[in-house]
Amino acid sequence: MKRVLWVALLLCSCGNHHPQQTTRTAPPADAAAPHDAPALDRDLPRLAQRALEMTEHVAAALTAAGEDCAAATQKLTELHAAYTDVVAANAKVMHDGRAREMRQALEPMSAQFDAAAKTIMGSKTLPRCSQDAAFARAFDLLFEAPP
């Protein structure tokens, strides 16, 4: 499995805060975006919020899947479809050299990112499924630049 996730989680994890439990289970539409909103990579507060939602949904998916690699892969594939805009916008921000700006946008949400990262890292799914090629690919697609 690529290390892109760990870099993304480290970028998102901006502090050492007490984790909070999340109960979100379904990815929401980007309702915060008005019809004439700027592109997601140009609206960093909105991108940060969507990235948090995505990360929390990944955490919830891995928790729900447990050691069932097929279920985890299915859910990650669904999340990729729901958050393709986030993956592409994150890649664009990083490509443009705006990582510092993105970290600033993420800072107010650092406690939630820390909690989600802790859940992901502590899940039973990662050690069980990390060598499963389909799972690894579905996981990586959420955190790497699109082709």
Image: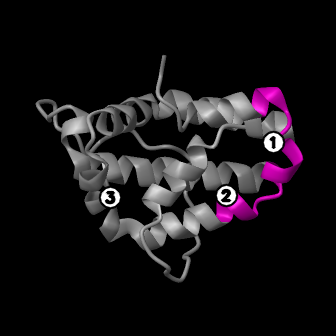
User: Residue 136 occupies which quadrant of the picture?
Assistant: top right
Disc 2 is placed on an element classified as helix
Provide residue 45's location: percent of width, then percent of height: 24, 53
Which amino acid is tagged 1?
Ser
Q: Residue furthest top?
A: 147
Q: Residue furthest front?
A: 97
39 displayed left or right of 31:
left
Provide residue 140's location: percent of width, then percent of height: 62, 34
76 displayed left or right of 22:
right
Q: Which residue is under mark 1?
A: 130
Comes first in the chain, label 1 or label 3: 3
- What's the mark number on residue 103? 3
Q: Residue furthest left?
A: 36
Kindly report the secondary structure that dominates the magenta region of the rendered protein. Answer: helix
Task: Look at the image and give the residue range highlighted in magenta.
Answer: 119-135
Mark in the foreground, 2 or 3: 3
Which amino acid is tagged 3?
Arg
- What's the mark number on residue 120? 2
